[in-house]
Amino acid sequence: MARDFSPEPNAEEPAGELVSRTLRPGFRPHLVKRSPYFHLMFSPGQWEATEMPDHGWTWLPKLKKLPLTPGVNGVRGGHPHADGSLAIAGAQQRGMLIIPDDYQGGFVMRHMTATGYTHLHKSERLVRVGPRSEVRGDSVAWNQFRYDLVQDGIIPPPTAEELDLLMDRQRRRLERNQKAVHIPAVAARVELDTAKLQGMANAAEELLS
Amino acid sequence: MAVITNSTLVGDLRLAAALSRSIFELLYDRAALRTSTAVSYLGSVNQTGSAVMRVRQYGVGGYTAFTAVGEGVDVANTNPIISHADCTISRGALRYDMGDLAMVTMPGEGMDPTRIAEKMVAGFDQWLNELITTAAAGLGTDVSPGSGVDLDLDSFFDAIYVLEIANNSAPFHSILAPVQVSDLQQSLRGAAGTVSFMPATAELVSARGQGYCGSLLGVDIWKSDSVPTANAGADREGSMVAGGCLGWAAGIPVPPMSGDFTTYGDVPLLVEFQRDSSACVTEIVGNAYSGACIVEDARGVSITSDA
């Protein structure tokens, strides 16, 4: 699969509430491990209910990274780039859906660190927190990206059976904890889990209606 | 009368600092997942003719149950289910260069080429940990308390249920990021009923290797800071597996004809001392060939929780 290693467009400024200082132009952050190019993949049936600012409770697909790390799940070492063709085929054989690399004009960003390049999703940023550099994600942007994948038909929406299974798991979690609501920490969790279950049910109803 | 003080002598008759006899290692994650029971060793590709170790899988015997057949009726032929998992080997290496003058001025024992060569094993283990944990993050089924939510006991239970429902047999093994382990312990404090957590003792760590944290609900827990991030950096993606879910394979480097090398009995690693005479430098180079893979997806789940 073709990959574009040309310099990425200038990253947006990181969110102010997350960091003490923004990344200086040309600064090579230390303490961030380099990471290889990656594909994103979706395993059928793997959904999670998330509350989005614009859409309320919504079912979003759980995405996994398929990093082109030589030696992992069939990725072969190569020069100058690792060869992930066998790894992709292996993942597809296990039922994974590979998100096209060029979706939304590409979503993998390359950043320079002290030890080499690190590849991040476009919703992630390298930020300085005190003396350290860290990777921080923008959860709103990440959720929107996952939402768009379903809206654009890249990932087919979940079936009623898949959602039932996930809501059953949430119900079991509630039932386990409802026996111990006299413990304040458990009571707080039960309250959150109850709201989440209601949100899951509402989102499922809206999706399947 | 002038007093002879230490400070006046520093630089001529006294040293500014005396080097202690002991040398301390900086902190790093000492876990070695290759020694854990969570991962199976698939063998070496040496002299196999390929850099890919193919794990053969077949579903016969109990995979397909007998069916009731009437008296005198031919029983239909059953096609056995066959499959495979490929573990691709790649190269990992580490090199340090040491100048002669640095060795000449070394006071007693210290950071010398022999010591560096001994420590190469830990570097290899860190690399292999990364391969194993990255492979595990590719498991198809995921349990999670929700993105950005701390790992809790309920999700740990969910992981056990998913494995049990899929016909897996205990014992199960879990590989978690340090933050996931501490979140899980925090969740235990608010747990109702009887939940048994058996923390690792010195004897257990000695028997099961560095990184072993203890056992919760019969699941052995290993901690590794190589567990990758997920969900745009918000989470860590650990795993819980049954035996036969994850595997690693190796290619054992062949020692060269020269005598300047070190091998290790239980680690597929070759460390060589290469002399660059024109630069008066000794290169200490470690080379290894390894790979990790998911052997059977149904035997494991990933556990995603707040990073």
Image: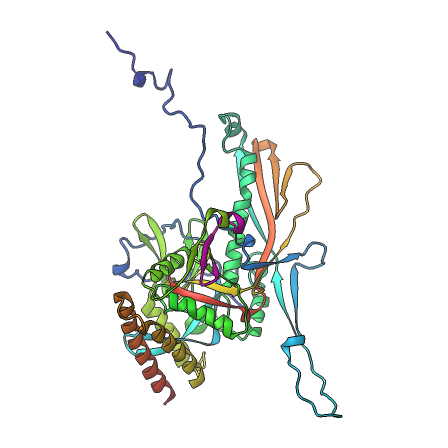
- Residue drawn at x 29%, y 12% as measured from the top left: B4
Q: As drawn, is A47 to the left or to the right of B268?
A: left
Q: Which residues are magenta?
A: B205-220
Q: Position of residue B19 (x, y in %)?
A: 42, 27
Marker count (numbered):
0
Is the C terminus of chain A in the top left, top right, bottom left or bottom right quadrant?
bottom left
- Residue drawn at x 42%, y 28% as measured from the top left: B20
Q: As drawn, is B269 to the left or to the right of A119?
A: right
Instruction: State how the image is colored.
Output: rainbow
Whether residue B134 is situated above or below residue B77 in the rendered picture: above
Outermost front residue: B194
Whether B174 is among the magenta residues is no
Q: Position of residue A124 (x, y in %)?
A: 37, 62
Q: Nearer the viewer, residue A85 or B243?
A: B243
Q: As drawn, is B19 to the left or to the right of A79?
A: left
- Residue drawn at x 31%, y 74% as measured from the top left: A178
Q: Can you tell which quarter of the image residue B44 is in?
A: bottom right
Whether residue B143 is visible, yes or no, is no
- Residue drawn at x 36%, y 68% as measured from the top left: B147
Q: Position of residue A122 (x, y in %)?
A: 39, 65
Whether residue B254 is situated above or below residue A151 in the rendered picture: above
Q: Nearer the viewer, residue B86 or B65?
A: B65
Outermost left residue: B1
Whether residue A73 is situated above or below residue B126 in the rendered picture: below
Is the N terminus of chain A in the top left, top right, bottom left or bottom right quadrant?
bottom right
Q: Nearer the viewer, residue B202 or A92?
A: B202
